[in-house]
Amino acid sequence: MADCTLCRNLQPDKFDVHDVDGAKKIRIDIPRRSLITSADAGCETCLIIYNAWTALATGLTLHKHYVRVDFVSAGAPLQISGKGSYKGAAPWTVGEIYTLPNGEANKTWPEIGTSPHFPPDLLTSKAMKLPKEWLKDCVENHAECQARHESQLPTRIISIDPESGKPRLCIPAQSTKGRYVTLSHCWGNFSPLKTEMATLQARMNGITIPEMPKTFQHAIRVTQLLGFQYLWIDSLCIIQDSKEDWDLESSRMQEVYENATLNIAADFARDSTEGLWTGKRLLSSSQAVWNSKNGDCVYARSAYNDLDTSGLSHVPFQSTGSEYVLNTRAWVLQERLLSSRILHFAEHEMAWECNSCCRCECKISPRKSTAKSYLSIFEDPTLSTDRKLDAWYELIRRYSTLKLTYESDKLPALAGLASKAAKSLHKTYCAGLWKEDLPYGLLWVIRDSRRSTRLRTRVPSWSWASIQGKPYQTRHLFPSSGWSTVRATFESRIMEIYTDYGGGSVYGSLQLGIINIRGKKAPVTFDTEHRVVMETSESTLKTEGDKVRPDVNDWSEFHECDLSLFLLFICDEISTEFGERRFYAMALILRPGEIRSRRSPRTFCYKRIGVYQYWRQENNSIFLNRFQEEEICLI
């Protein structure tokens, strides 16, 4: 093959290595006009690049662009992208060039790299070959992924007959062990096939495939193709109209997902009617751009470098930042974090995620999974309790942005993760907070309360779970930058905590939650600008420079009732640069509640409606003298 001065026959050692996004890469930029001229002159390599470009980059102006070729890694397909001819134009990935493994074209063009074709139909043994390889590698080689071969089967599970493929709901004996798969899916506006008291026996007799929604049908098929007999689906394996069964089984979510060998995630499906995939696979569409004498080819196909918001699957540039429906659901967060291994069915490709790495069809090299970082913190015995508490509250912020169909699921949908965190923290769980972290744990605030609402549930007002909004623990608000703490004390102490879970799990639905707390309380009102006004018989104090952080965007909670401040925390700080001192305090904003204290009928009950932050570079006694010691009941 004659040596081409333009493409240099794609010999890597003939090109300079560039620093690209912190990585060393071999990169070639070829002007379009020069590429056309070289291809017309008989350079087959330039012809391959030109054919690939014209096949994939339809609609682009020929003479105003460069063609960029990147050597990603040894043996990997070449990436081909476009680059504007004007200074500073950003490239956009168009596709990749590859040959089939062990083919004639691979021998002729070893520098191009190999890849199999992406199967157009995912519900085939050919398509499941790659996930099988991922699973085998994970079970045999990943120490972090708990390679248990068999575990206790859940209370109910779908058994798929190996011969007929017919599924039925079964109740395994208590000691029965096996390997099983779980399904994560979005219920959406369409109610999926369910098991209820009236249909339980019929489900155990057998479920016909046609009566199943498409996502369930696909999950049954994938389970079979991967070599499993058992599949767990929430709507079928939990009796949906039995509160007793639902409470019990939802409290066992941690065991169900942790013990499963694999979780199947229907990432992009809006409900159970849409299936694991749409039937259209952009990645499976390839075109021959060079033919050998024996019919073997060099191929080009679309490829994507941009990741979806989960960081798992690749999407077109136009879809960058898109989020699949499944990842917006609150229940799915713990399903994803608790599962040792997940096979994701995204819009454009399959992706793999385990405790060790994540992979996808279109990229060879594994990447580190970002979602698993929370669990790795809880499981690390070398980390401090404070670091683990920080991780918990970071997790809560993320969880609180997700959606629930039923407001009453706010705590149950987190139960599995809460149980796991409790074992790591060695603390007592209290409606999303930790008993041993009180009263500190009460100092959460809602950022951007304009978008928050109070949920109509029995979750007590002192828990962040009573609010639809994003909570921030105030341990991230101090000490202030440029200041050091002289003295920091909590001005209250917990006297008693009473929680009633109605006989269910302590991580599940709450019937009643009461905290008796002793500290300093002062009556207040708020002016039209929502500033605190503290009045006594001697004087009136209207605070300036303070900050009122309401829990919800409805300021009507602050109107037409007797409001109070309950002092939780005070701090003296000194400027590290100028030596100035200032006083900082935080208090709960309370309004009267409807019930009396369980501890003492004479103790008044209050509901939290916000947090008050006060700071001054002056004498703070004027502020503190307005508070009186009192025991109150928070509900």
Image (cartoon, rainbow, N blue to C red):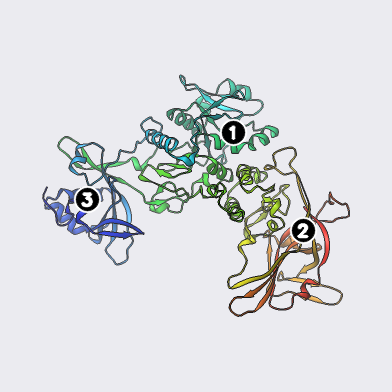
**Comes first in the chain, label 1 or label 2:** 1
Is any atom of residue 171 visible in this view? yes
**Residue where numbered disc 2 is placed:** 493
Mark 1 → mark 2, Cα distance in angstroms: 44 Å
Q: Secondary structure at mark 1?
A: helix
Residue type pointed to by label 2: Arg
Q: Amino acid under label 3? A: Ile
Q: Is residue 182 above or below residue 484?
A: above
Q: Secondary structure at mark 3?
A: helix
Please report whichever mark, 3 or 1, sits nearer to the chain's N-terminal start: 3
Q: Are marks 2 and 3 in contact (CB under 8 Å)?
A: no
Task: Locate residue 565, reporting x and y percent.
Answer: 77, 65
Give the residue type at disc 1. Answer: Ser
Q: Which mark identifies residue 235?
A: 1
Tell me the crowding category of disc 3: few under 14, some 14 to 19, or many 20 or more residues within 10 angstroms, Cα based: many
Q: CA distance from mark 3 to mark 1?
A: 51 Å
The image's mark for residue 49 is 3
